[in-house]
Amino acid sequence: VTSGASAQLCFPSDWPRVFSTSKPLRALVNGTLRGVRCRAVAVDASGEREPASSFQRAAQLAASSDATLVKGFVVYELADGPRGCAFVAIRRWWNAAPGGAWFDAARPLVPGGRQLLLVESPLGERGEAAGRAGLGGGSFEAALRER
């Protein structure tokens, strides 16, 4: 078992090929998360952002612009294990531009990363029921942000 404070996370190695070769990744995205869409999105490195949660940031952008709110998960690979074998999903919200392109304006949980693997999911809603499903977020996300 890995805690948020000690987990070494990275963008899934060998993307996009890993999606067709890794049964654990496909099972997570298509099964556990019930993914609707899955996209690799470039991290916006345009400057420092305050440590607001992705939920607050995405909701604020949706309310104040023509961007829409997208709910789901960010998926990382556990970097300290065998490649393509272990992944973690953390609940996250982001936005879609009017043309449909996804963007995430919140600060990334993993410093130095250049991409995020985002999975739109009906399970992306915050709340008590979602937490009971054991699907990322909460103290794990907070521990990652504190590193």
Image (tube, rainbow, N blue to C red):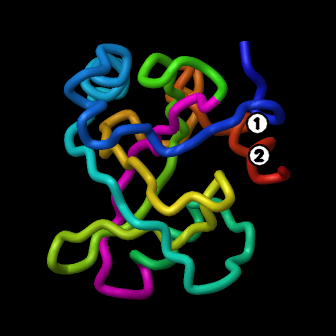
Direction from residue 39 to residue 100 in the image, left or right: left
Which residue is at the front of the view, 40 or 51?
40
Q: Residue at x 57, y 60 (%)?
A: 54
Count of numbered badges drawn on the protein? 2
Residue 29 point in image, percent of width and height = 32, 28
Q: Mark 1 points at which residue?
A: 139
Q: What residue type is labelled 1?
A: Ser
Residue 71 point in image, percent of width and height = 38, 51
Residue 84 marker: none
Q: Which residue is drawn at 58% across and 32% down?
A: 136
- What distance separates the C-alpha of mark 2 from that of mark 1? 5 Å
Residue 12 point in image, percent of width and height = 44, 38
Q: CB under 8 Å between callouts 2 and 1?
A: yes
Q: Residue at x 69, y 67 (%)?
A: 52
Q: Name the residue under label 2.
A: 142
Looking at the image, residue 128 lies above or below residue 134: below
Q: Residue 40 occupies which quadrant of the picture?
A: bottom left
Q: Which amino acid does label 2 sit on?
A: Ala
Q: Which residue is drawn at 39% across and 48% down?
A: 117
* Magenta stretch: dominant secondary structure: strand
Looking at the image, residue 25 lies above or below residue 111: above
Question: For the residue carrying disc 2, how many other residues have a C-alpha within 10 Å: few (<14), some (14-19), or many (20+)?
Answer: some
What's the magenta region?
63-79
Direction from residue 96 to residue 109 in the image, left or right: right
Q: What element carries label 1?
A: helix
Question: For the residue carrying disc 1, how many other residues have a C-alpha within 10 Å: few (<14), some (14-19), or many (20+)?
Answer: few
Which residue is at the front of the view, 82 or 107?
82
Residue 35 point in image, percent of width and height = 26, 34
Direction from residue 76 to residue 24 in the image, left or right: left
Q: Does the magenta stretch include residue 64?
A: yes
Q: What element carries label 2?
A: helix
